[in-house]
Amino acid sequence: MRCSVLVSTLLFAPILAVSAVSQGQGQTSGQTSAAASSSFSTETSPAAAILPATPVPSGNFFARLGNAYFADWHPAPSSDPAPKRRGYDGPLDSTPFPSSDYSVGGTPVIGAPDTQTYMLMQAIDQNRSRTKIYGWFNGGFDASTSNKGDGANSPAAYYYNPNRIIPDQEVLYIERIPDSVQTDHVDWGFRIAQLWGQDYRYTTSKGVFSQQLLARNHEYGYDPVMYYLDIYVPHVAKGMNIRMGRYISLPDIEAQLAPNNYTYSHSLLYTIDPYTQTGIVASIKLSDHWLLQTGFSDGNDVAIWTKDIKPTGTVCVDYTWKKGGDALYTCANSFNDGKYAYNNLQSYYETWYHKINAHWHTDTEAWYMYERDVPNIAGNVANPITPETGANGAHCAVGERTCFAPEVAIVNYVEHEFDTHRYLSIRNEFVDDIKGQRTGYATKYSEHLISYGHWIGSTILFRPELRLEHSYDLKAYDLGTKSTQFVAAGDLTYHF
């Protein structure tokens, strides 16, 4: 009942805004905050609303919520100074891009202030609290040349079912971000993130409500995708953040949550690598140029109480230059003995971010992954080993019961900003699933996408896209009957 009331309240906020203004109640002055100059990590929603600097007059919850949306959709120029920040300014504008900083996982941006404001929090307490409750509703559609039923779009994601309207992810965050601008005292933060929708099938961690997917293969499900504690220690180098709990895997241009991506769909590269880890990671800002990250987890996408846990290390180094315009992010995301278990990938990444000018930038990521002793599912060996549920086998050579299963990939994004509410994304990638352990088909792939993003204020984002992909050695699309797939798709994200 509470959920339905909240959904109705948020969906009818525009009507409430118009009503409140027409009655002359609670209309704001239209002054805007300095939110546009803020920066966010890859795990933070970019919907930093342009809300009035002056207090919104009192009124009932519905009027305050309506006024918040009205102010976001009808902003006035602001002369407010940018908030204090240690280090380089973020190289990008957010909006329209997911973040003003390049993607570095496992930590808030050390030295960047939390200037985010949200519609729901404006209605609750005018965004005065450091603990914030917010989220979004995200849904989409796809029209595909694949048409043979459930899973026919795979390995494309996040729309694996063809020709559907999809409730992708409905998300609620409760969080507090530590103050890492100041350098005089230890501070803390936390995040609890809840997700429901089709996208749960990509974030599921074995042992955490995973029976929905691994036992029943439900089309829609629930996943508590993040729950962690942050401790910020200012006196280590130029600041250190320690994260403990379940968090998003550190590297990648993309992220699981819809607002953190340039596009609706994800690259093949991102679809088949690890998603979350449960452990501890320390991020140390050595200087404005260098960030060092070291961590320890129980493995990829597994809970600590499952038999699949593997003591796993993480080491990443980020080097930034040209006053923040370029960054090289080198990451050994997960390394251990490498033996076959649930998603026990050994994964190594290199990501280069480059700002070309005020309107263009490009991001490129390459990786190498593997598992050892993967069961042979090619049908060419006596007494084959049955793979673990949810953990693919490999297409090994004749007579091999197990084999080494590697894959390599590279993806490039080219981004153009028309203005702070419109942008263009072009994505090209190549993936070689050498033994078919990640996609089910031992083949090479290419994928090409063009997408357009359009914001209304900072709270509604529409992203239509066209996508063409091809498998070269085997037919991998439409349940193994086609080599080429074309998809027209789009999604809508509504922030609250």
Image (tube, helix red, strand yellow):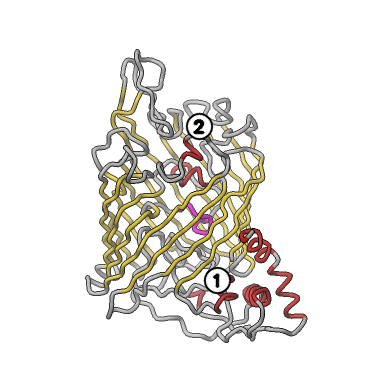
For residue 118, which numbered disc appears in the image? Answer: 1
Between 196 and 112, the one nearer to me in the picture: 196
Report the Cα–Cα distance between label 2 and label 1: 43 Å
Mark 2 highlights which residue? 471
What amino acid is labelled 1 in the image? Tyr
* Secondary structure of residue under mark 2: strand
Q: Quadrant of residue 74?
A: bottom right
Residue 79 is left or right of residue 295, and the answer is: right
The correct choice, above or below, for 464 with respect to 20 in the image is above
Extreme residue in the front direction: 1
Q: Residue at x 36, y 54 (%)?
A: 250
Q: Position of residue 364 (x, y in %)?
A: 41, 52
* Quadrant holding the C terminus: bottom right
The correct choice, above or below, for 323 with respect to 427 in the image is below
Labelled pair 2, 1 in contact (Cβ < 8 Å) = no
Q: Residue at x 27, y 54 (%)?
A: 295
Q: Residue at x 46, y 67 (%)?
A: 100
Q: Is residue 260 magenta?
A: yes
Q: Position of residue 27 (x, y in %)?
A: 68, 83
Between 446 and 305, the one nearer to me in the picture: 305
Q: Position of residue 305 (x, y in %)?
A: 33, 43
Between 194 and 32, the one nearer to me in the picture: 194
> Which residues are drawn in magenta?
254-262
* Quadrant holding the N terminus: bottom right
Q: Quadrant of residue 286?
A: bottom left
Q: Quadrant of residue 143?
A: top right
